[in-house]
Image (cartoon, rainbow, N blue to C red):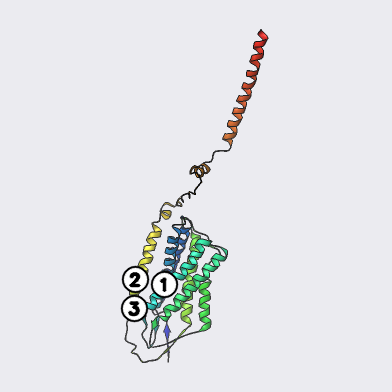
Amino acid sequence: MQGTVDGFSYGLVTPLVAYLMACLGGALGLRCTTRSLRVTRSWRPGWLALGSAAIGSGIWTMHFIAMMGFTIEHTPVRYDWLMTFASLAVAIVMVGVGIFIVGYRGARGTALFTGGTITGLGIASMHYLGMAGMRLDGQLTYNTFTVALSVAIAMARRPRRWRPAGPSFPLWSLRPILVMGLAVTGMHYTGMAALEVHVHGTSDPGTGGSPAELLAPMLIGPLAFLLLAAVVVMFDPLMVTGKPAGVPVERKPGVPAHVGASRTVRHPAHQPVRRTRRTLVHRRSRAPQTAIRPLSVAGRY
Protein backbone atom coordinates (compact mmCIF):
# COMPACT_ATOMS: atom_id res chain seq x y z
CA MET A 1 0.00 0.00 0.00
CA GLN A 2 1.00 3.58 -0.53
CA GLY A 3 2.08 5.45 2.59
CA THR A 4 1.08 9.02 3.29
CA VAL A 5 4.15 11.27 3.33
CA ASP A 6 4.10 14.28 5.63
CA GLY A 7 6.99 16.74 5.44
CA PHE A 8 5.52 19.32 7.84
CA SER A 9 4.90 17.42 11.06
CA TYR A 10 5.98 20.50 13.08
CA GLY A 11 4.30 23.02 10.83
CA LEU A 12 6.46 25.84 9.50
CA VAL A 13 9.07 25.49 12.26
CA THR A 14 11.32 23.04 10.46
CA PRO A 15 11.19 24.84 7.05
CA LEU A 16 12.06 28.20 8.63
CA VAL A 17 14.90 26.80 10.75
CA ALA A 18 16.19 24.85 7.75
CA TYR A 19 16.15 28.03 5.65
CA LEU A 20 18.08 29.94 8.32
CA MET A 21 20.73 27.20 8.46
CA ALA A 22 21.13 27.30 4.69
CA CYS A 23 21.55 31.09 4.84
CA LEU A 24 24.09 30.79 7.66
CA GLY A 25 26.20 28.30 5.75
CA GLY A 26 26.01 30.41 2.60
CA ALA A 27 26.96 33.60 4.43
CA LEU A 28 30.00 32.00 6.06
CA GLY A 29 31.06 30.38 2.80
CA LEU A 30 30.82 33.57 0.75
CA ARG A 31 32.59 35.52 3.47
CA CYS A 32 35.48 33.06 3.57
CA THR A 33 35.70 33.11 -0.23
CA THR A 34 35.87 36.91 -0.18
CA ARG A 35 38.52 36.80 2.53
CA SER A 36 40.63 34.42 0.44
CA LEU A 37 40.90 37.08 -2.29
CA ARG A 38 42.46 39.57 0.16
CA VAL A 39 45.33 37.44 1.44
CA THR A 40 48.47 35.96 -0.03
CA ARG A 41 48.29 32.76 -2.05
CA SER A 42 49.71 30.74 0.84
CA TRP A 43 46.64 31.52 3.01
CA ARG A 44 44.06 31.25 0.24
CA PRO A 45 43.53 27.45 0.31
CA GLY A 46 42.77 27.57 4.04
CA TRP A 47 40.04 30.19 3.67
CA LEU A 48 38.56 28.42 0.63
CA ALA A 49 38.53 25.09 2.49
CA LEU A 50 36.81 26.73 5.46
CA GLY A 51 34.20 28.25 3.14
CA SER A 52 33.60 24.90 1.45
CA ALA A 53 33.09 23.15 4.77
CA ALA A 54 30.77 25.94 5.96
CA ILE A 55 28.52 25.81 2.89
CA GLY A 56 28.51 22.00 2.81
CA SER A 57 27.71 21.75 6.53
CA GLY A 58 25.01 24.40 6.25
CA ILE A 59 23.31 22.62 3.37
CA TRP A 60 23.57 19.23 5.07
CA THR A 61 22.22 20.63 8.35
CA MET A 62 19.38 22.30 6.47
CA HIS A 63 18.46 18.98 4.86
CA PHE A 64 18.24 16.97 8.06
CA ILE A 65 16.55 19.71 10.07
CA ALA A 66 13.87 19.64 7.41
CA MET A 67 13.82 15.83 7.67
CA MET A 68 12.89 16.14 11.35
CA GLY A 69 9.41 17.04 10.16
CA PHE A 70 9.30 14.15 7.68
CA THR A 71 7.11 11.20 8.63
CA ILE A 72 5.50 8.32 6.77
CA GLU A 73 2.23 6.81 7.86
CA HIS A 74 2.23 3.13 8.93
CA THR A 75 6.03 2.79 9.12
CA PRO A 76 8.86 4.21 11.25
CA VAL A 77 11.81 5.93 9.54
CA ARG A 78 15.40 5.26 10.54
CA TYR A 79 18.70 6.48 9.10
CA ASP A 80 21.92 4.71 8.21
CA TRP A 81 24.73 6.67 9.87
CA LEU A 82 27.41 5.73 7.31
CA MET A 83 25.28 6.77 4.33
CA THR A 84 24.15 9.91 6.13
CA PHE A 85 27.66 11.18 6.85
CA ALA A 86 28.77 10.10 3.37
CA SER A 87 26.26 12.64 2.03
CA LEU A 88 27.95 15.30 4.20
CA ALA A 89 31.35 14.42 2.71
CA VAL A 90 29.96 14.58 -0.83
CA ALA A 91 28.46 18.01 -0.15
CA ILE A 92 31.74 19.43 1.24
CA VAL A 93 33.92 17.97 -1.54
CA MET A 94 31.75 19.02 -4.48
CA VAL A 95 31.04 22.47 -3.05
CA GLY A 96 34.78 22.77 -2.42
CA VAL A 97 35.56 22.05 -6.06
CA GLY A 98 33.22 24.81 -7.15
CA ILE A 99 34.56 27.31 -4.61
CA PHE A 100 38.21 26.61 -5.46
CA ILE A 101 37.46 27.19 -9.15
CA VAL A 102 35.91 30.58 -8.35
CA GLY A 103 38.63 31.41 -5.80
CA TYR A 104 41.49 30.87 -8.25
CA ARG A 105 39.85 31.71 -11.58
CA GLY A 106 37.75 34.69 -10.54
CA ALA A 107 34.05 35.25 -9.93
CA ARG A 108 33.02 35.86 -13.52
CA GLY A 109 32.41 34.17 -16.84
CA THR A 110 33.24 30.52 -17.35
CA ALA A 111 34.72 30.03 -13.87
CA LEU A 112 31.55 31.23 -12.15
CA PHE A 113 29.35 29.10 -14.41
CA THR A 114 31.46 25.97 -13.90
CA GLY A 115 31.84 26.46 -10.16
CA GLY A 116 28.13 27.15 -9.70
CA THR A 117 27.14 24.12 -11.76
CA ILE A 118 29.40 21.77 -9.78
CA THR A 119 28.12 23.24 -6.52
CA GLY A 120 24.51 22.73 -7.59
CA LEU A 121 25.19 19.14 -8.57
CA GLY A 122 26.83 18.63 -5.19
CA ILE A 123 23.73 19.92 -3.40
CA ALA A 124 21.48 17.58 -5.40
CA SER A 125 23.83 14.62 -4.83
CA MET A 126 23.88 15.28 -1.10
CA HIS A 127 20.09 15.40 -0.98
CA TYR A 128 19.42 12.14 -2.80
CA LEU A 129 22.31 10.33 -1.11
CA GLY A 130 20.85 11.38 2.24
CA MET A 131 17.46 10.10 1.12
CA ALA A 132 19.10 6.79 0.18
CA GLY A 133 20.24 6.53 3.80
CA MET A 134 16.66 6.21 5.05
CA ARG A 135 15.61 2.81 6.33
CA LEU A 136 11.91 1.97 6.42
CA ASP A 137 9.50 -0.86 5.78
CA GLY A 138 8.72 0.10 2.22
CA GLN A 139 10.05 1.10 -1.16
CA LEU A 140 10.91 4.62 -2.34
CA THR A 141 10.15 5.77 -5.88
CA TYR A 142 10.66 9.17 -7.47
CA ASN A 143 8.92 11.13 -10.17
CA THR A 144 11.52 11.74 -12.87
CA PHE A 145 10.25 15.15 -13.96
CA THR A 146 10.12 16.51 -10.40
CA VAL A 147 13.60 15.19 -9.66
CA ALA A 148 14.95 16.94 -12.76
CA LEU A 149 13.20 20.11 -11.65
CA SER A 150 14.84 19.93 -8.22
CA VAL A 151 18.28 19.48 -9.78
CA ALA A 152 17.64 22.46 -12.05
CA ILE A 153 16.71 24.58 -9.02
CA ALA A 154 19.93 23.54 -7.27
CA MET A 155 22.03 24.45 -10.32
CA ALA A 156 20.19 27.74 -10.89
CA ARG A 157 21.20 29.03 -7.45
CA ARG A 158 24.50 30.42 -8.78
CA PRO A 159 24.52 34.23 -9.21
CA ARG A 160 25.13 35.63 -12.68
CA ARG A 161 27.57 38.15 -11.31
CA TRP A 162 29.10 38.10 -7.86
CA ARG A 163 30.89 41.06 -6.32
CA PRO A 164 33.12 40.35 -3.33
CA ALA A 165 31.92 42.13 -0.22
CA GLY A 166 34.20 44.44 1.71
CA PRO A 167 34.84 44.32 5.43
CA SER A 168 31.72 46.32 6.26
CA PHE A 169 29.42 43.61 4.76
CA PRO A 170 26.96 45.93 2.92
CA LEU A 171 23.27 45.17 2.64
CA TRP A 172 23.43 44.29 -1.04
CA SER A 173 25.67 41.31 -0.15
CA LEU A 174 22.72 39.75 1.72
CA ARG A 175 20.83 39.30 -1.52
CA PRO A 176 22.84 36.32 -2.89
CA ILE A 177 22.80 34.73 0.59
CA LEU A 178 19.01 34.93 0.89
CA VAL A 179 18.58 33.70 -2.68
CA MET A 180 20.96 30.82 -2.01
CA GLY A 181 19.07 29.78 1.11
CA LEU A 182 15.75 29.98 -0.73
CA ALA A 183 17.05 27.94 -3.68
CA VAL A 184 18.59 25.23 -1.49
CA THR A 185 15.47 24.93 0.67
CA GLY A 186 13.25 24.98 -2.41
CA MET A 187 15.35 22.25 -4.00
CA HIS A 188 14.92 20.10 -0.88
CA TYR A 189 11.14 20.35 -0.73
CA THR A 190 10.84 19.95 -4.49
CA GLY A 191 12.82 16.72 -4.21
CA MET A 192 10.60 15.58 -1.35
CA ALA A 193 7.53 16.27 -3.50
CA ALA A 194 8.93 13.82 -6.06
CA LEU A 195 8.95 11.02 -3.46
CA GLU A 196 6.40 8.22 -3.35
CA VAL A 197 6.50 5.50 -0.66
CA HIS A 198 5.00 2.04 -1.03
CA VAL A 199 4.71 0.54 2.46
CA HIS A 200 4.98 -3.22 2.91
CA GLY A 201 3.10 -3.20 6.22
CA THR A 202 5.20 -5.91 7.89
CA SER A 203 6.61 -3.85 10.76
CA ASP A 204 5.04 -2.31 13.83
CA PRO A 205 4.42 1.42 13.23
CA GLY A 206 5.00 2.16 16.93
CA THR A 207 8.60 0.91 17.03
CA GLY A 208 11.49 3.36 16.74
CA GLY A 209 11.97 6.89 17.94
CA SER A 210 10.77 10.10 16.36
CA PRO A 211 12.82 11.68 13.54
CA ALA A 212 13.94 14.46 15.89
CA GLU A 213 15.30 11.94 18.41
CA LEU A 214 17.15 10.06 15.69
CA LEU A 215 18.62 13.07 13.85
CA ALA A 216 19.49 15.35 16.77
CA PRO A 217 22.68 13.45 17.77
CA MET A 218 23.95 13.55 14.19
CA LEU A 219 23.41 17.31 13.91
CA ILE A 220 25.54 18.22 16.95
CA GLY A 221 28.88 18.02 15.11
CA PRO A 222 27.99 20.10 12.02
CA LEU A 223 26.16 22.67 14.16
CA ALA A 224 29.21 23.06 16.42
CA PHE A 225 31.42 23.47 13.35
CA LEU A 226 29.18 26.21 11.93
CA LEU A 227 29.32 28.09 15.23
CA LEU A 228 33.11 27.76 15.33
CA ALA A 229 33.39 29.00 11.73
CA ALA A 230 31.15 31.95 12.61
CA VAL A 231 33.47 32.84 15.51
CA VAL A 232 36.53 32.68 13.23
CA VAL A 233 34.91 34.95 10.66
CA MET A 234 33.61 37.43 13.26
CA PHE A 235 36.99 37.82 14.98
CA ASP A 236 38.99 37.97 11.79
CA PRO A 237 41.22 41.11 11.72
CA LEU A 238 39.58 42.27 8.50
CA MET A 239 36.18 42.24 10.20
CA VAL A 240 37.39 43.83 13.44
CA THR A 241 39.46 46.70 12.02
CA GLY A 242 37.44 47.22 8.85
CA LYS A 243 40.68 47.59 6.87
CA PRO A 244 42.12 45.10 4.40
CA ALA A 245 45.12 43.24 5.65
CA GLY A 246 48.39 44.33 4.11
CA VAL A 247 49.73 41.87 1.62
CA PRO A 248 53.54 41.68 1.88
CA VAL A 249 55.52 42.47 -1.24
CA GLU A 250 56.93 39.34 -2.76
CA ARG A 251 60.73 39.60 -3.05
CA LYS A 252 62.11 38.11 -6.20
CA PRO A 253 65.78 37.25 -6.78
CA GLY A 254 67.74 39.96 -8.53
CA VAL A 255 65.36 42.79 -7.55
CA PRO A 256 66.62 45.25 -4.88
CA ALA A 257 64.43 45.63 -1.81
CA HIS A 258 64.25 49.43 -2.11
CA VAL A 259 62.65 49.32 -5.55
CA GLY A 260 59.23 48.50 -4.20
CA ALA A 261 59.50 51.17 -1.50
CA SER A 262 60.54 53.86 -3.95
CA ARG A 263 57.46 53.23 -6.04
CA THR A 264 55.12 53.70 -3.13
CA VAL A 265 56.47 57.21 -2.26
CA ARG A 266 54.86 59.89 -4.40
CA HIS A 267 55.92 63.52 -4.38
CA PRO A 268 53.72 66.35 -5.63
CA ALA A 269 54.31 67.17 -9.24
CA HIS A 270 54.91 70.90 -8.62
CA GLN A 271 57.87 70.51 -6.24
CA PRO A 272 60.43 69.18 -8.76
CA VAL A 273 59.38 71.85 -11.25
CA ARG A 274 59.91 74.69 -8.77
CA ARG A 275 63.28 73.39 -7.72
CA THR A 276 64.38 73.06 -11.31
CA ARG A 277 63.30 76.61 -12.15
CA ARG A 278 65.05 78.07 -9.13
CA THR A 279 68.31 76.33 -9.93
CA LEU A 280 68.11 77.48 -13.54
CA VAL A 281 67.44 81.10 -12.58
CA HIS A 282 70.24 81.07 -10.05
CA ARG A 283 72.71 79.70 -12.55
CA ARG A 284 71.69 82.23 -15.18
CA SER A 285 72.10 85.12 -12.71
CA ARG A 286 75.60 84.05 -11.78
CA ALA A 287 76.80 83.39 -15.31
CA PRO A 288 76.80 87.07 -16.48
CA GLN A 289 78.59 88.20 -13.32
CA THR A 290 81.48 85.84 -13.83
CA ALA A 291 81.72 86.93 -17.45
CA ILE A 292 81.67 90.72 -16.75
CA ARG A 293 84.28 90.84 -13.98
CA PRO A 294 87.29 90.03 -16.19
CA LEU A 295 86.18 92.63 -18.71
CA SER A 296 85.82 95.35 -16.05
CA VAL A 297 89.23 94.60 -14.62
CA ALA A 298 90.79 94.70 -18.02
CA GLY A 299 89.18 98.06 -18.69
CA ARG A 300 90.79 99.66 -15.62
CA TYR A 301 94.26 98.80 -16.80
- Of the image marks 2 and 3, the number of the one nearer the N terminus: 3
Q: Which mark is residue 220?
A: 2
Going by the numbered disc 3, the residue's amino acid type is Leu
Q: Secondary structure at mark 3?
A: helix
Disc 2 versus disc 1: distance between alpha carbons? 16 Å
If the image is split into quadrants, where does the N terminus sit? bottom left
**71 lies above or below 264:** below
Residue 249 position, x and y percent, is 48, 49
Nearest the viewer among 131 and 4 is: 131
**126 lies above or below 171:** below
Residue 222 position, x and y percent, is 37, 69
Mark 1, Cα crowd under 10 Å, few <14 / some 14-19 / many 20+, is some
Disc 1 versus disc 3: distance between alpha carbons? 20 Å
Going by the numbered disc 2, the residue's amino acid type is Ile
Q: Which mark is residue 89?
A: 1
Q: Looking at the rendering, which quadrant does residue 225 occupy?
A: bottom left
Q: Which mark is residue 4?
A: none
If the image is split into quadrants, where does the C terminus sit? top right
Disc 2 versus disc 3: distance between alpha carbons? 12 Å
Nearest the viewer among 285 and 249 is: 249
Q: Are marks 2 and 1 in contact (CB under 8 Å)?
A: no
